[in-house]
Image (cartoon, grey):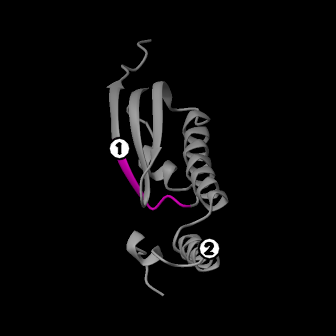
């Protein structure tokens, strides 16, 4: 079965032959492409990883984000935003990597170092 069916191949063909050729082409297309439900599953998985990383970072008591955007990359996440932290700030990339599915962290955070409170 050819992958591409040209219009000229239908000249003089019966309606049954045309219908069979169209059905064959549809079957090929169905096997070559993922279904819509597969695409939705992939998108939900990506979004769930982003949400899990964001929850983990925002819940950390020593991290004070003014803004935080987490985007899924092929092997992990990209972090963007603005963080205020003191000198005892934990490793943000290390925290993000504790989330399942995050092997790599691209850290594009802007960090403002807070001055220790004067007594």
Instruction: State the image quarter where residue 18 is shown.
Output: bottom right
Q: Secondary structure at mark 1?
A: strand
Q: Residues within 10 Å of mark 2 (few under 14, many from 20)?
A: few
Q: Is residue 105 magenta?
A: yes
Kindly give the residue lying farthest to the front in the view shown: 12
Choose between 51 and 12: the one closer to the eye: 12
Residue 15 in the image, given as x and y percentages of width and height: 62, 73
Stretch in magenta? 101-107
Q: What's the residue at 41%, 40% (across, down)?
A: 79
Verify CB contact (< 8 Å) between mark 1 and mark 2.
no
Q: What's the residue at 56%, 39% (across, down)?
A: 54
Residue position for label 1: 107
Residue 112 in the image, given as x and y percentages of width and height: 34, 24
Residue 1's label in the rendered image is none
Q: Residues within 10 Å of mark 1 (few under 14, many from 20)?
A: some
Q: Is residue 83 visible?
A: yes
For marks 1 and 2, the one nearer the N-term is 2
Q: Is residue 20 magenta?
A: no
Residue 15's label in the rendered image is 2
The answer to whether 107 appears left or right of 63 in the picture is left
Relative to residue 87, is residue 25 depicted above or below?
below
Q: Nearer the viewer, mark 1 or mark 2?
A: 2
Mark 1 → mark 2, Cα distance in angstroms: 60 Å
Choose between 114 and 74: the one closer to the eye: 74
Residue 88 in the image, given as x and y percentages of width and height: 43, 36
Q: What's the residue at 38%, 21% (across, down)?
A: 114
Relative to residue 69, is residue 72 depicted above or below?
below
């Amino acid at each position: 079965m050819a992958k591409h069916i040209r219009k000229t191949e239908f000249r003089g063909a019966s309606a049954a032959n045309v219908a069979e050729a169209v059905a064959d082409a549809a079957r090929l297309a169905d096997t070559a492409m993922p279904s819509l439900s597969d695409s939705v599953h992939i998108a939900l998985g990506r979004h769930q990883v982003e949400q899990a990383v964001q929850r983990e970072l925002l819940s950390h008591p020593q991290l004070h984000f003014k803004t935080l955007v987490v985007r899924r990359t092929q092997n992990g996440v990209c972090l963007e935003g603005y963080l205020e932290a003191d000198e005892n700030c934990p490793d943000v990339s290390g925290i993000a990597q504790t989330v399942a599915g995050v092997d790599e962290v691209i850290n594009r955070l802007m960090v403002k170092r807070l001055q220790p409170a004067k007594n």
